[in-house]
Amino acid sequence: MTFEAGAAGGIVDLMVGLPPVPGDMTWRDTLRPLLKDEESLGGFQHPASYMFKNLPSERFADDPPRAVLEAMDHFGVAHALIGLHPDDGVSVRAIREHPDRFSGAISVDPNAGMEGVRALRHAVEELGAKAAAAMPTGVIPQRAVDEPQWYPLYAACIDLGVPFMPCMGVPGPRIPFAAQHVMGLDRVCYEFPELVIITRHGCEPWEDLMVKLMLKWPNLHYSTSAFAPKYYPQAIVDYANTRGADKVLYAGYFPMGLSYEQIFGQMPGVGFRDHVWPKFLRENAQRIFGF
């Protein structure tokens, strides 16, 4: 089965951004306390501009939901997991007006204590959030996933029935990486065997270890966000083709750093076997999230 045949039933993209209005650089304000080098503080147009050279033209839009829906329709993306930001109104409106096309992932902060747990519960129960997302190197102070400050959030995810989606691996922004070492997932899976985890952002350079951990822990999964398909780690492709067809899920990075033209232009070159494509593009996400 080719990529095109696997995509025929519609693609589920587990990382799509609603583009801000032109010129919005809010990301820099969020990360500013962690940034030290001059380019990151003032010159970069993207948190990892040294990696993402040709930023998509769609990364800003006056009507974000409409712009993203038009791109999704053009490339056969049936459903997208977007960042849910209760305070901005745009993401809430997009999900409420297009529940068949958008679902939300709420960012969680382990340093917020019970306030963070209550915010997660509100997002799931009142706003329909489908996942708890996190960047362990981006919270202040940074917290590795096996630090106890995360544990109330893990218990809440289990109670609410939503997966935890942490960025893992060396981060793109020029900030310390230790908090995103995949080794920490071993302790989390041990202490919380019911917690469904789907990693984001590649897990490099520990992708081989990530495969070992997925073999070990049944509720641990991997998504391909922020990686152009030609850079998918070979260890992950090999794992999906053998014992991991149910563990690897498609996530893009549109329009933050990758265009759909780039993603789907390269996708046919990924060496997935026939049985992997529909699981990777759609079925695994449908099973886990109930889309």
Image (tube, rainbow, N blue to C red):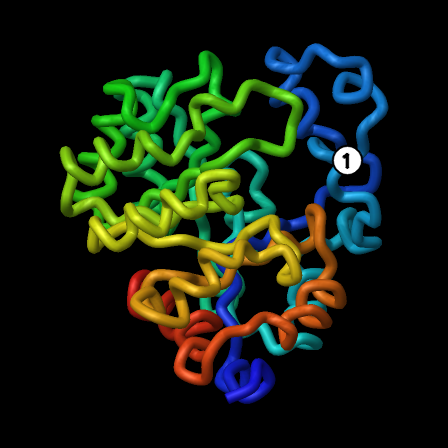
Residue at 44% x, 65% y is 238
Residue 65's spot in the image, x, y percent? 65, 58
Taking depth in this image into account, of 217 and 205 the one nearest to the observer is 205
Taking depth in this image into account, of 271 and 277 the one nearest to the observer is 271
Q: Is residue 139 above or below residue 20?
A: above
Residue at 83% x, 35% y is 23
Taking depth in this image into account, of 101 and 197 the one nearest to the observer is 197
Residue at 21% x, 49% y is 217
Q: Dot 1 lies on which element?
A: loop
Type of amino acid under label 1 = Ser
Residue 285's spot in the image, x, y percent? 38, 65
Residue 96's spot in the image, x, y percent? 48, 58
Q: Which residue is mark 1?
A: 49
Residue 246 in view in this figure: yes
From the viewer's perspective, tell me whether residue 217 is left or right of residue 203: left
Around disc 1, counting alpha carbons within 10 Å, would you say few (fewer than 14), some (14 to 19), or many (20 or more)?
Answer: some
Residue 109's spot in the image, x, y percent? 40, 25
From the viewer's perspective, tell me whether residue 186 is left or right of residue 37: left
Residue 62 in view in this figure: no
Q: Is residue 53 above or below residue 16?
A: above
From the viewer's perspective, tell me whether residue 51 is left or right of residue 129: right
Residue at 41% x, 47% y is 208
What is the quadrant of the C terminus in the image? bottom left
